[in-house]
Image (cartoon, rainbow, N blue to C red):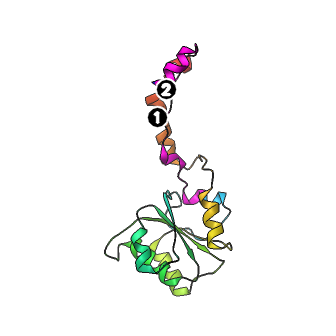
Amino acid sequence: DLVRMGLEKKGLTTLGVLPYQKGLDIPTMREIRDSANIDILYEGENLDMLAEQILIGAMRVRDALKFIKDNTLMIIPGDRDDMIKAVCDLHLGKLDVKSNISGIVLSGGLKPKEWTVDFLKQSKLPVLLTHEDTYSVASRINSLVVKLKPQDVEKIKIIVDMVEKYVDIDMVMA
């Protein structure tokens, strides 16, 4: 309403004002893979999961688990088999709580042991692998500019709903 009033005072007709939607700023695992140019180790079940929170899994497992919530991207050094297994177990609901993990980025170019790779496959999580150190990849992912892609079905639906609600389509078409 304030934007509309301000523009009308300047003699401009407002066709609509779209409010900020936080969900449109959140990258998907696919976007992280593509934009950060990170190799895929295991595609998992859903590369279009939103990564709402980014955590580095470098502390003791029992301490790190306290910080993980739904839609968390875990960045873990590839040799931290204990943390990788715990994240897989958490995602699969094998611990006291369950969290839907968005995916895992393994840093340092270190591939986990074969038995850990089996846990990753069972979890069906997307797993990316980078040769960068943990801090560098976390910084790059955190500073990504999120762009809308054709496969971002949920985000496109949000935008369509906002346009229907906040834009005067009849005035646009006139």
Residue 129: which quarter of the image? bottom right
Whether residue 31 appears in this view of the structure is yes
Residue at mark 2:
167
User: Where in the figure is residue 132, as x and y percent of width and height?
Assistant: 68, 72
Could you tell me which residue is drawn at 61 percent across and 60 percent down?
Answer: 141
Is any part of residue 33 visible from this angle?
A: no
Q: Residue 29: percent from the left, percent from the top?
A: 55, 60
Please check the rendered image and state whether residue 4 is part of the magenta-colored stretch, yes or no.
yes
Q: Residue furthest left?
A: 96
Q: Position of residue 39 (x, y in %)?
A: 65, 69
Considering only order in the chain, which callout, 1 or 2, is on the residue closer to the N terminus? 1
Image vertical order of residue 64 relative to residue 170, above or below: below
Local crowd size for mark 1, using a 10 Å CA cut-off: few (<14), some (14–19), many (≥20):
some
Question: Element at badge 2?
Answer: loop
**Residue 9: x percent and y percent?**
54, 14
Tell me the quadrant of the picture where the N terminus can be found.
top left
Q: Indicate the amino acid at tag 1.
A: Met
Q: Give the residue at mark 1.
A: 162
Q: Amino acid at mark 2?
A: Val
Q: Residue at x 42, y 68 (%)?
A: 67
Seen from the viewer's position, the closer of residues 24 and 117 is 24
Q: Residue at x 58, y 46 (%)?
A: 150
Contact flag, marks 2 and 1 (Cβ < 8 Å): yes
Q: CA distance from mark 2 to mark 1?
A: 8 Å
Instruction: Residue at 54%, 56% (x, y): give it.
Output: 28
Q: Secondary structure at mark 1?
A: helix
Q: What residue range appears in magenta? A: 2-31
Residue 3 vertical position relative to residue 21 in the rendered view, above or below: above
How many numbered markers are drawn? 2
Asked whether residue 129 is drawn in magenta, I would say no
Side of 124 where 173 appears, left or right: right
